Image: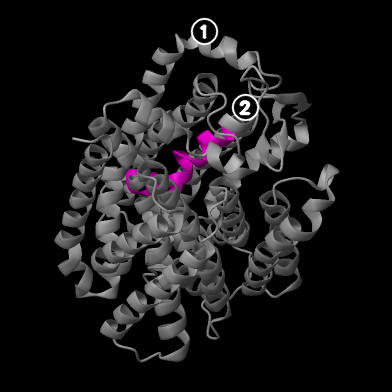
């Protein structure tokens, strides 16, 4: 059997399992919009943990992050991973339980816009509309990054045209999410989380073996200027975006650049994004027993630390083993695929690379589902047709899902897209739009509706302003847009809240009730 056929069979078996899960949950998903969008708050601790992390990390964990490490070395990838691990921990520790309790008490909210609107007892649904619109914009970009991942995977494996491969992957993801809804997404995310960590770990172990051991990997990595440093960064020598290769067949690097304190803080700020990630926050809201979130946090942290470490390691090992294989930043994101196909017999390689498919599906179905719910539940039913039946909301959710997917496909048509860059922009958008107001809503009684509106608009718009207008100025301005946008949003929320009247007595009493209730829930270890 040809290698490509064996790989196809392995991946087809995986896809078959995913479809079975979707069909299994299809009936329950169609019973109500509550089941379709949040699974009736029925998740257990293991599914909550794995689904949150698998839907969060997406294909960039197996392609984007290793690609960064392969292209410019340890520092950028490692500091990003450290920031993400810290952010993951604090999000589970501080936000998870309080949000689960608050979202239930505040009108049994089943979407993030719902929660924020209910939190401030809105009559005119301004917060709801702003939140829903930002979700639609940034999740279209996020879903596009997943479709780029699928396109690169299939075009690399089967020598298929990128656009055809990308569209085929998008169609599968849309059909799956369309049928199964939140429960199918969460159940398959659990399985996909297992596949992802298995794939990452296996490739790292075999990579170290092929490279001659950890010592050999480190020694070879250190021979490249700035490549294996926390405070320096390698600079590939490029012409028209392509790394140059010497006559002796060696990849050429310029002198290492410094990786200073400001850059480290900027990169660590990836962790701030977690406080505003709807796909993660929704899993907090969906757990059946909030007391089990302690167990979920521990499961999630083990998964995150192992997965991020392995992903960075794959990029480093890949550069040692295949120094001239991938000569553009976009191509570098295929190092996981190159290593898998070279290390394993085709069928096993197919199983391992199902990890990329797993990561992509687990994320894109979350993104599409949340974006669809933002429109159908919050704009269609919340604004335009308040008397919409549950069945009409369900139909609107599925139609919106199709439209968003089409927009994402259009964004993903560029074959030279760098997954890491696409994800970093959407991540900053969510982190700055929702992170600050989520934290203030959960932990500061004095925050007002006007403060929430001003903070969300400031955070979301500043991501665009900093990325497109300020960051290109370079120097001290060349920092990740999430950090200045997040901080400015916090400042605006505080100032606006103090300049406007305090929240009503009803809102303040509800805040105290949530605080007391959350503290009274025993942790189940």
The number of numbered discs placed on residues in the rendered structure image is 2
Question: What is the CA distance from the residue labelled 2 to the residue labelled 1?
Answer: 17 Å
Q: Foreground: 10 or 34?
A: 10
Q: Residues within 10 Å of mark 1 (few under 14, many from 20)?
A: few
Instruction: Work out which quarter of the rendered image holds the C terminus and state it.
Output: top left
Q: Foreground: 109 or 279?
A: 279
Say if 321 sits above or below 453 in the image: above
Q: Secondary structure at mark 2?
A: loop
Residue at screen point 76% across, 71% down: 499
Main secondary structure of the magenta stretch:
helix
Residue 407: x and y in percent read: 49, 70
Residue 430: x and y in percent read: 57, 58
Find disc 2 in the rendering and name its residue. 73
Residue 97 visible in the displayed image = no
Find disc 1 in the rendering and name its residue. 215
The range drawn in magenta is 50-69
- Report which quarter residue 350 is drawn in: top left
Please check the rendered image and state whether residue 67 is part of the magenta-colored stretch, yes or no. yes
Residue 179: x and y in percent read: 24, 67
Residue at screen point 53% across, 80% down: 122
Residue at screen point 30% across, 32% down: 349
Say if 301 sits above or below 218 in the image: below
Dot placed on the residue nearer the N-terminal end, 2 or 1: 2
Residue 177: x and y in percent read: 30, 63
Q: Foreground: 393 or 137?
A: 137
Q: Secondary structure at mark 1?
A: helix
- Report which quarter residue 444 is drawn in: bottom right
């Amino acid at each position: 059997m040809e290698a490509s056929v064996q790989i196809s069979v392995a991946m087809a078996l995986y896809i078959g399992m995913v479809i079975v899960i979707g069909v299994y949950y299809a009936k329950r998903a169609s019973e109500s919009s509550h089941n379709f969008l949040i699974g009736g708050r029925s998740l257990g601790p293991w599914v909550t943990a794995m689904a949150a992390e698998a839907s969060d990390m997406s294909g960039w964990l197996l392609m984007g992050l290793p690609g960064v490490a392969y292209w410019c070395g340890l520092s950028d990838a490692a500091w990003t991973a450290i920031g993400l691990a810290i952010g993951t921990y604090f999000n589970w520790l501080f936000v998870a339980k309080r949000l689960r309790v608050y979202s239930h008490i505040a009108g049994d909210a089943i979407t993030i816009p719902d929660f924020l609107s209910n939190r401030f007892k809105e009559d005119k649904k301004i917060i709801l509309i702003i939140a829903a619109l930002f979700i639609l914009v940034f999740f279209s970009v996020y879903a596009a990054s997943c479709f780029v991942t699928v396109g690169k995977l299939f075009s690399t494996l089967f020598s298929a045209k990128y656009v055809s491969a990308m569209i085929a992957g998008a169609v599968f993801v849309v059909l799956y999410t369309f049928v199964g809804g939140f429960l199918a997404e969460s159940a398959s995310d659990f399985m996909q989380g297992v596949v992802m960590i298995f794939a990452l770990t296996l490739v790292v172990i075999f990579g170290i073996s092929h490279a001659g051991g950890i010592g050999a990997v480190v020694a070879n990595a250190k021979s490249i200027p700035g490549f294996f440093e926390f405070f320096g960064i390698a600079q590939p020598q490029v012409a028209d975006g392509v790394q140059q290769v010497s006559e002796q067949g060696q990849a050429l690097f310029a002198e290492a650049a410094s990786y200073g304190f400001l850059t480290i803080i900027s990169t660590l700020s990836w962790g701030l994004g977690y406080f505003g990630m709807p796909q993660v926050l929704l899993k907090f809201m969906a757990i059946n027993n909030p007391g089990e979130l302690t167990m979920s946090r521990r499961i999630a942290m083990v998964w995150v630390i192992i997965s991020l470490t392995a992903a960075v390691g794959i990029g480093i090992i890949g550069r040692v083993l295949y120094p001239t294989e991938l000569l553009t930043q976009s191509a570098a994101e295929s190092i996981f695929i190159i290593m898998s196909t070279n290390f394993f017999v085709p069928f096993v390689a197919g199983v391992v690379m199902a990890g990329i498919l797993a990561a992509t599906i687990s994320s894109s179905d979350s993104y599409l589902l949340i974006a669809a719910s933002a429109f159908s539940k919050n704009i269609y039913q919340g604004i335009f047709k308040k008397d919409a039946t549950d069945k009409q909301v369900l139909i609107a959710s599925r139609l919106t899902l199709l439209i968003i997917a089409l927009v994402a496909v259009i964004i993903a048509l560029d074959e030279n897209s760098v997954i890491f860059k696409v994800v970093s922009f959407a991540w900053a958008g969510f982190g700055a739009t929702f992170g600050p107001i989520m934290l203030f809503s959960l932990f500061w009684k004095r925050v007002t509706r006007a403060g929430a509106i001003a903070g969300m608009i400031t955070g979301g718009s500043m991501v665009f302003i900093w990325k497109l207008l300020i960051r290109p100025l370079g120097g001290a301005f060349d920092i990740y847009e999430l950090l200045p946008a997040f901080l400015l949003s916090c400042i605006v929320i505080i100032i606006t809240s103090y300049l406007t009247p305090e929240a009503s007595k009803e809102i303040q009493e509800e805040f105290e009730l949530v605080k007391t209730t959350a503290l009274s829930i025993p942790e189940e270890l």
